[in-house]
Amino acid sequence: MRPIILDFSDSSSDSLYIQLYRSVRDDILSGQIKGGEKLPSLRVLSKNLNISITTTQLAYNQLLVEGYIISKPQSGYYAAQVSASKYDLPVMKPYDFTSDEAFHLEDNPFICDGDCFDFNKWKKCSSKVFNDYSDLLLFESDTQGESALRFEISKYVYSSRGVTCTPEQIVIGAGTQQITGHLCRILSKMNINHVSLESPGYLPVHSMFCDSGFAISHIPVDKEGIDISKLPINISSAVYVSPSNQFPTGAVMPVGKRSKLLDWAADNDSIIIEDDYDSELRYFGRPVPALQSLDKNSRVVYLGSFSSTLFPAVKISYMVLPQPMVEIFEQIKGQYTQTCSKAEQLTLALFMEKGYYYTGIRKLRSLYAQKLAITLQTFDVFGGDNIIPIDTQSGINLIIKIKTKKTADRLCEEAKSIGLQMIPLSELTEQETTALIFYYSKLPINRIESLIKNLLQIWDA
Amino acid sequence: MRPIILDFSDSSSDSLYIQLYRSVRDDILSGQIKGGEKLPSLRVLSKNLNISITTTQLAYNQLLVEGYIISKPQSGYYAAQVSASKYDLPVMKPYDFTSDEAFHLEDNPFICDGDCFDFNKWKKCSSKVFNDYSDLLLFESDTQGESALRFEISKYVYSSRGVTCTPEQIVIGAGTQQITGHLCRILSKMNINHVSLESPGYLPVHSMFCDSGFAISHIPVDKEGIDISKLPINISSAVYVSPSNQFPTGAVMPVGKRSKLLDWAADNDSIIIEDDYDSELRYFGRPVPALQSLDKNSRVVYLGSFSSTLFPAVKISYMVLPQPMVEIFEQIKGQYTQTCSKAEQLTLALFMEKGYYYTGIRKLRSLYAQKLAITLQTFDVFGGDNIIPIDTQSGINLIIKIKTKKTADRLCEEAKSIGLQMIPLSELTEQETTALIFYYSKLPINRIESLIKNLLQIWDA
């Protein structure tokens, strides 16, 4: 074995062990020490070079970790087979990041309005997180969600919807599916395994509860919301309602009926899940208080989301739990991890704290109202008698009734082909009349008229 | 009813309907039109003001949507009760965003090294996403993950681990839990409901499969990994292995045994789930190819994650599915939504595309090797005979064996009190000897020596 030489004239300021490490590494890479060749022991090499055993050990460890040498128990150190670095990190070829292939824009045929959101203010907040709070990014997010964001949400839901809660009652997750997943586990722990859903109602909710093994009842909805007399009694269960804007009927539950629903929950040791989706965009004109704000018996779980009021790629939802359910979540939350990006949560907390969120909602409301006006006017002027738009005051969509022989699916496909998002509303479909939900709010305002004219031509209705 | 006056001298460039809307709104807000007062019909008002019915309708619609007026069927329009705007958006009080209350730093007692990650480069990529690609944020993320990121991952896993796949085979999710959730649903569709786990092994995996209703076998692990002879035969099942660095033993499965495991899967129509966690930080020195790279029969699901190589707050994991499982995922993916932040996925894609990720890993490896060297040296010099650190070459942690009468939990608590992260390794605990896993890699390099000295004093071992 040729001797390892440590060149002490090395002018670098690196410590001795780094110099030794580099010397051996270079000998292995150049082939002067061959793969499989035995290296001198720590003791021998230290003595030869007149350096401490610790220094030699540090150098060998570094070589070991980087894979230049291997250690065989009861035998010693050997040079590794470092060949054409089969597993070395690659030099990447440049890639056209803006290509369609990279982003699959064709997967998103729907036209979306970039004026709905102020990306500059968001970016400002995002930069502040990386500049000033990057220490916080060195830890994983709290399973329950960032405390700064929960604080902002608790202030917000109180002032906007009368929902009273502490930040400790709020659980944040990446979308309704994640939140509902946690909720199912809490309900199971409470020995509740039956949930009543609105019929017609928001379909994805069905599969969420179904996936978690819940038994499901479908309760009819009239123009004042769910039929309370058909809910289970003498058993603990849960009911999922959207009392402020029932999907898809737009029914609003009056205050008197809300009290009755709360009484049902208290009398039957049951839980009300109140989905207040998109409330920011529509409760104006219908200031019915949230069920949660009327609840005195810790019976209501309140669900909210930022999907419609920020840009669509942000998936941050939340629920407000009554105190007894908070305690159950405390017991199980260790088994789960937070799905929302921590940086995005902190960015949103800053965005709310600086008031940008509130400004944004005011702007959105005014913008969407104008879009609605233009949409209604265009259908009115160009639509003819076979098309009747119905303003459900949802703030983001309306219902279109069409007298046609085409199927709802066909009409939606045709709308999609020019970038318009519609979904069939089979519950309201009668003989030769088809009903669709039309998301006018996503369209750029100066294109609505021409897009709808185009649609009417394609539909030929 | 006092007449509504439209001031045509309004010098603004706003359209007529906005001027009418504003005029009525201001009258309602000032009390000149009282709450509950009936408004003129569309026809009457249009005639009085000599404007078109459409213009009046647009103004009324805007007022309706914003809640200033209400519409009663078969009756007409009425001014709403717009009082002290109970539900108006709040003016927020400034909040001390940097307070401990906001961030609950006390929940994270462990010391974390900010030098491990280049936040400036990340921020640069993040800004580029908001500046140049904000159009992409107007659509929700693909359930499978952003195609740009899947492209970068496919290049990366091939060059770093020999894993061959197309971007279409990759599924992205916010952490192992989300990915495993999808995997469980795919396996169920394949009629597989039994999974074999390594024992001892990574505990959270157990509850993930358990939660999804899988039957579980625990298969013993020796120094070459899982005991293949104990796996189920004559039945389709799945096995979860970490062949490149078994947790917690650090066992590496030799190539010969890998072939046998692949044969077992092919012979029994079964699936191997290969968890290659943290591979970037440790496969050097043990260039055993990934199981996936040896698989010719579409039997291996490969799991990877960015948790250890980016900053801890990023939760982006991925799996590489064999083609037949891709087709099953295609069928069910419509039921689920993407949990990873789209902006963060695009940022990471740019970060990889620009080569920053590769630079970062090289830096991390060198940094962690130095930290390991200092850690071993400090224990060597100051630790005495009762403490034996064992380098498992994991790249991020090592095992410490301690002769003590204290329990493992007690030792970990004491370590935590000074910010050091350790977890008990009960499987290796013998009489009066306790074994712990010590995450030295998270500590700032210039504090390791003093922290360990401090620890030794507290332990008094």
Image (cartoon, coloured by chain):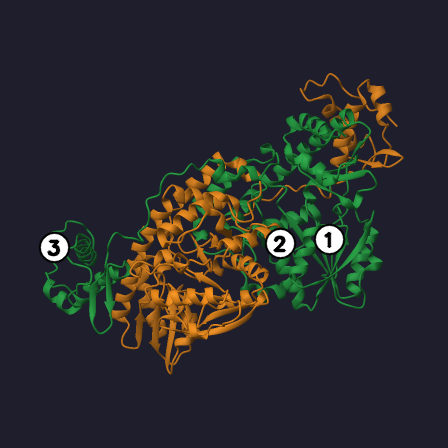
Chain colours: A orange, B green
The chain to which mark 3 is attached is B
Subunit of label 1: B
Extreme residue in the bottom direction = A431
A100 or A198: nearer the eye? Answer: A198
**Residue B169 in sight:** no
Residue beneath label 2, please? B177
2 vs 3, front mark: 2
Q: Earlier in the sequence, mark 3 or mark 1?
A: 3
Q: Position of residue B80 (x, y in %)?
A: 23, 60
Label 1 element class: helix
Amino acid bearing label 1: Ser
Q: Position of residue B255 (x, y in %)?
A: 81, 50
Q: Quadrant of residue A70?
A: top right
| Kind of residue at badge 2 | Gln
Query: What label sits on residue B293 in the rendered view?
Result: 1
Please tell me the numbered disc located at residue B8: 3
Which marked residue is nearer to the observer: mark 2 or mark 1?
2
Q: Is residue A83 above or below residue B47?
A: above
Say whether marks 3 and 1 touch (CB < 8 Å).
no
Can residue A403 be seen here? yes
Labels 2 and 1 touching (C-beta < 8 A): no
